[in-house]
Amino acid sequence: MTVGSQLSEIQETTTSAPVTEDGDHERMAHIVLEGFRPSEEEFIAAGPTVAEGIINGTPVRALCGKTWVPSRDPKRYPLCPTCKEIAAQMGWSVPG
């Protein structure tokens, strides 16, 4: 293998990887754990709800760790792969 072919191989490898920009995380819908129900009559809050975040400007935290004040329609964006993976590992049904 020559140096030229090695360089070509390295360039192919680096250009085929997806390039993400700093703002890409902003263009995703995230899963927020608002709380859970250990029984039918009990609800334990895990933090601010998305509705509370929208109305009061309270930051919410996604499963992936992102913290932000919700203001956009999440249906317009793809689901965060990290949130999706965490939810799947927990055995939760994840929207497609």
Image (cartoon, grey):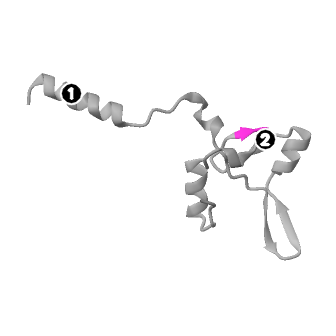
Where residue 88 sits in the image (x, y, percent)? 57, 62
In the rendered image, the residue lying farthest to the left is: 1
User: Looking at the image, how many numbered discs can be counted on the residues?
Assistant: 2
- Quick check: can you spot residue 16? yes
Visible in this render: residue 48? Answer: no
Q: Position of residue 5 (x, y in %)?
A: 14, 28
Residue beneath label 1, please?
Answer: 8
Q: In which quarter of the image is residue 86?
A: bottom right
**In the image, 8: left or right of 51?**
left
**Residue 44 % position (x, y):** 83, 63
Reply yes or no: does residue 11 show up in magenta: no
Which of the 4 image quarters holds residue 65?
Answer: top right
68 within the magenta span: yes
Considering the numbered disc 1 on the image, is that residue within a helix, a strand or a loop? helix
Secondary structure predominantly adopted by residues drawn in magenta: loop
C-beta proximity under 8 Å, tags 2 and 1: no
Residue with the most extreme front position: 76
Give the camera-side residue of 8 and 31. Answer: 8
Quarter of the image for the N terminus: give it.
top left
What residue do we see at 71% from left, 46% from top? Answer: 74
Say which quarter of the image contains residue 9: top left
Residues drawn in magenta: 67-71
Which residue is depicted at the point 67% across and 48% down? 30
Q: Is residue 36 above or below residue 67?
A: below
Tell me the number on the disc at residue 40.
none
- Residue at coordinates 61% horizontally, 51% vertically from top-left? 83
Tell me which amino acid carries mark 1.
Ser
Q: In this view, does 21 lie above or below 69?
A: above
Disc 2 is placed on an element classified as: loop
- Label 2 to label 1: alpha-carbon separation: 44 Å
Find disc 2 in the rendering and name its residue. Answer: 70
